[in-house]
Image (spheres, helix red, strand yellow):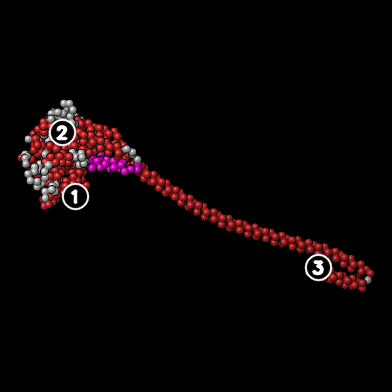
Amino acid sequence: MLGLAAEEQNVLRIHIDELVFGLIAFVVIFALVYKYAVPRITKMLDERADSIEGGIERAKKAEAEAEEARQQYREKLGEAHRQYSQELEKAKEQRAAIIAEAREEAQVEARRIIDAAHAQIEADRQQAMNQLRIEIGTLSTDLATRIVGESLADSGAQGRVIDRFLAELEQADDAQQAEVR
Amino acid sequence: MSADTLNLAAEGGGGLFTPGGPGFEAPSVGIFFPEAWSWGDYGAGSPYLGGITKYAVLLLVATALTLLFLWWTTRKQTKVPGRSQSIGEIFFLFIRTQISRPMMGVKGDKYLPLLISLFLFIFAMNIMGIIPFLQLPVPSNLSYPVGLALIVYITFIVVGIRAHGGVGKYLKSAVVPSGAPWWILPLLVPIEVISNFMIRPATHAIRVFATMFAGHLLLATFAAGGWYMFNPSAGPVFGTISVLFSGASLLAFILFTAFELVIMFLQAFVFTLLAALYIGEAQEAH
Amino acid sequence: MEGSLNVIGYGISVIGAGIGVGIVFGMGMQAIARQPEARGPLQTNIYIGFALIEALALLGFVLAFAI
């Protein structure tokens, strides 16, 4: 057999059985690659690409969220500042108003007190005047009575009465002045 | 290879500078015809049957190697790839970016499994030529590359017929060059027919076969020559010379083995690339 | 030493194919270097030309052993 084969040593031989062996081997490999290897590899590559892209997406979203939060925070801060200054302004206004009110009240009170004092003084003066008038009247009447009574009896006595009356009047005047003092 | 050639040289029994010794017998094409382990009448004497030869065994080894590689690289798939998974992905992306995408574009991605299996299988069969003790590239037997080329041939014809929507339309687009004047067609069409449907699959298969065949013969020649020239017992002067010659031959053998590895990779690449090219050309609607 | 004249003829004939393949790839590299963005179609055409020229060498190889 070897000799026979050696006689036909044609390099370009194609043996059907070897060709079929080769095809079978290739089909086995192809089936494994087609059913098992390539789907697994492509799936994993896709998954990885997905997750990388997703990661980038997530990072972008987080960044946007942070930016938004910062914006909100800034706005809030500005608002707080504005509110604070408003409050301050209001408080200042209130203070001024309170002070003005108090001052006005105080002035009104002072005027009222002064008016009251004036009224009192006026009333006192009036009363004093009235009393003085009554007293003067009484005194005049008294004096007149005495003068009339004395004249009847004695003209000498009349002079004494007048003197006495004047002395009394002086005494009363002194006493009254001392009382005032 | 070395087993055969060593036997060959050892049977010669002589060496350089042996007076009356046998001359140098370069390794012949006989090294590509290993004896078949046949049983019964199977494979005996038929010109169409090779029997269970070393080729068949090496084919099994190459297939096992390929399956092992596939299993090893896709065994566990995680988002953060391990070492083996990275190798598998790099290989996958290499086929896609270097072969599939430039030749077929994105719509060629569905032929990736075919290209990947072609590349892996051919490379595994080629590499049998430099693995010690096996040392016989499987494609140096024309039967195996012919099978693969046949698959690609059928694939691209089927793809072409499907893409163009009918046998006639596909043949017209494949055979009649667009833009040629009518009077030159009688000359062009037969050339295109022969080139596209006869020479193309033939050269597709023979390219791998011839490079593996020639490379293996080259390595065998260097090995046999080195063995033949190794004759230290030929006296002080001649012995030294023979050992030096033998060393040079050994060095060349090693260098050419490395070169062969590159060639094996390149041939697997070219085979796959041309398969992609043919399929891409067929599915391209004019 | 024995052999066939076919093989010598093949050796001579393959010189042409070798030169052709060299020209194809050399020019291809040049073209890609000049216009890197046209790499895709150039590469495709380089390999078509390479396959055609290589086909001649392979035909010679087959004829050397077949006849």
Residue at the image position 67 percent from the left and 59 percent from the top: A109
Residue C64: percent from left, percent from top? 8, 38
**Furthest-top residue in this view:** B41
Kind of residue at badge 2 = Glu
Mark 1: which amino acid?
Ala
The disc placed on residue B185 is none
Q: Where residue A95 sits in the image (x, y, percent)?
A: 58, 57
Q: Main secondary structure of the magenta part?
A: helix
Is label 1 or label 3 in front? 1
Q: Are marks 3 and 2 on the same chain?
A: no
Give the distance between the C-alpha atoms of the residues marked 1 and 3, in whole angstroms: 135 Å
Instruction: Please report, as a chain letter, where disc 2 is located.
Output: B
The quadrant of the image that shows the N terminus of chain A is: top left
Quarter location, residue B179: top left
Query: Mark 2 highlights which residue?
Result: B35
Q: Which residues are magenta?
A: B79-107
Q: Is residue A56 above or below residue A176?
A: above
The reply to whether the C-beta atoms of the residues labelled 1 and 3 are less than 8 Å apart is: no
Q: What secondary structure is marked by label 2?
A: loop
| Residue C33 numbered tag | 1
Residue drawn at point x = 63 percent, y = 59 percent: A103
Q: Residues within 10 Å of mark 2 (few under 14, many from 20)?
A: some
- Which quadrant would residue C47 be assigned to in this image? top left
* Mark in the foreground, 3 or 2: 2
